Image (cartoon, rainbow, N blue to C red):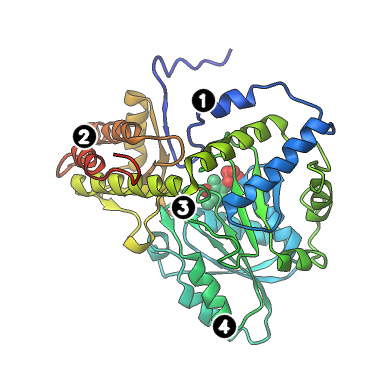
Amino acid sequence: MLKLDFHPSGRHFLQIPGPSPVPDRILRAMSLPTIDHRGPEFGALGLALLDKIKRIFKTESPVIIYPASGTGAWEAALSNTLSPGDKVLMFETGHFATLWHKMARRLGLEPEFIGLPGYEGWRHGVQADMIESRLKDDVRHEIKAVCVVHNETSTGVTSDIAAVRRAIDAAGHPALLIVDTISGLACADYRHDEWGVDVTVSGSQKGLMLPPGISFNALSDKAIAVSQKARLPKSFWAWDEILEANKNGYWPYTPNTNLLYGLNEALDMLLEEGFDHVLERHQRWAAGVRTAVEAWGLEIQCQDPTVYSPVLTGVVMPEGIDADEVRRIIYERFDLSLGMGLGKAKGKMFRIGHLGDCNDLTLIATLGGCEAGMKLAGVALKGSGVTAALDYFANHPLKGDN
Ligand SMILES: *Cc1c(COP(=O)(O)O)cnc(C)c1O
């Protein structure tokens, strides 16, 4: 038997920025018996889900649901809209943008990776002006798509997607806008239609509070039209057959039924709470956590306060401290998982997830684990982040609560 005696009592604190803790209500919904995915009951569930999910993306257009992790939906977005050798413009915001760029290469595209010089790009958001000037130079319109990450999970930066849209329009360029909001959806404000996004990629295990295993492509009319001529090979990912089957609430293959029960429950929870309330509580938690980091006298990975992420906060360790060692101590002593520094940020910082099924006290406990663990690791702290965050939460009730 798998030995899991590392979590002796109480709940493990899963405070990585995805997978996020799964609420009991969702776990229970997923425990229902699996049904016939070609039967009438399933068709009704499928239709209800495909309709409700549009409200989360803020779109009137179809949203495709894949039985795959977010990486699969990245591939789907590219392979349905592009042809071998196509140029795409991608912006380096961090590790996830870097992985997506690598994927574009492997698929036979010609991605151009732009960003701020050095490590700067990993501490700031997408620079829309750089995209605008690159597109203006592309007078022959060889660039077929602009790909950006909305919430860069490796750094804790939430870029301004409306500004990217304006940049593409200001350049008068026909490129598609493809956005990864795998970790932004249902945590950070996101508007697929209003921002003129052609394909939005997302996943289940972050803001939607589900286990890993489903992912999404939200489409636009333009993306659907382009997909009819795109020549990258695809079969499992191909939108056409899925859209056809989805008309009746079905899939061309076996979808993952129990995760869809969970998705249905998650959507009900988010819509019952009120989507604005969901977004507001994420902003408030993020502000509370930043107050703690400030009180510790440490740096936040994101250096531009206009793009601080409501989903997670990157905490930079002082020179000479290995962030992974700090995380190890916190995990072993307090049963608390924090996100590691990825790629260029490895060992330099750790990430506190504050998304989904949390509350003020989960975050206070999380900050408590961080504070105690950093002291044990020999990090010099200026003051108590826990006390600062407690005060912040006490003095900033959510609108509608008090
Ligand atoms: C989690 C994440 C991914 C990868 O998704 P998987 O489900 O791990 O395949 C990609 N991009 C971003 C921004 C993410 O947060």
Most distant residue in the left direction: 382
Q: How far apart are marks 2 and 3 (CA)?
A: 32 Å
- Label 2 or label 3, whichever lies nearer to me, is 3
Q: Which residue is found at the position 32% from the left and 42% from the top?
A: 322
Q: Distance between the residues labelled 4 and 3?
A: 27 Å
Counting residues from the N terminus, which is met first, the one under dot 2 or under dot 3?
Answer: 3
Q: Which residue is found at the position 72% from the left and 34% from the top?
A: 256
Residue behind mark 3: 188
- Label 4 or label 2, whichever lies nearer to me, is 4
Instruction: Judge whether residue 21 can be spotted in this image.
Output: yes
Q: Which of 9 and 394 is in front in this view?
A: 394
Counting residues from the N terminus, which is met first, the one under dot 1 or under dot 3?
Answer: 1
The amino acid marked with disc number 2 is Lys
The image quadrant that residue 1 belongs to is top right
Residue behind mark 2: 375
Relative to 194, does residue 241 appear above or below in the rendering?
A: above
- Label 4 or label 1, whichever lies nearer to me, is 1
Q: Is residue 287 left or right of residue 85?
A: left
The image quadrant that residue 103 belongs to is bottom right
Q: Disc 2 on helix, strand or loop?
A: helix
Q: Which residue is found at the position 56% from the left and 66% from the top?
A: 195
Q: In this view, does 235 lie to the left or right of 173?
A: right
Counting residues from the N terminus, which is met first, the one under dot 1 or under dot 2?
Answer: 1
Q: Disc 1 on helix, strand or loop?
A: helix
Instruction: Using the image, tell me which numbered label, if any, was put on residue 24.
Output: 1
The amino acid marked with disc number 3 is Ala
Measured as percent of width and height from the top left, residue 252 is found at 83, 43
Q: Tags 1 and 3 in contact by the CB under 8 Å rule?
A: no
Q: Which residue is found at the position 26% from the left and 45% from the top?
A: 396
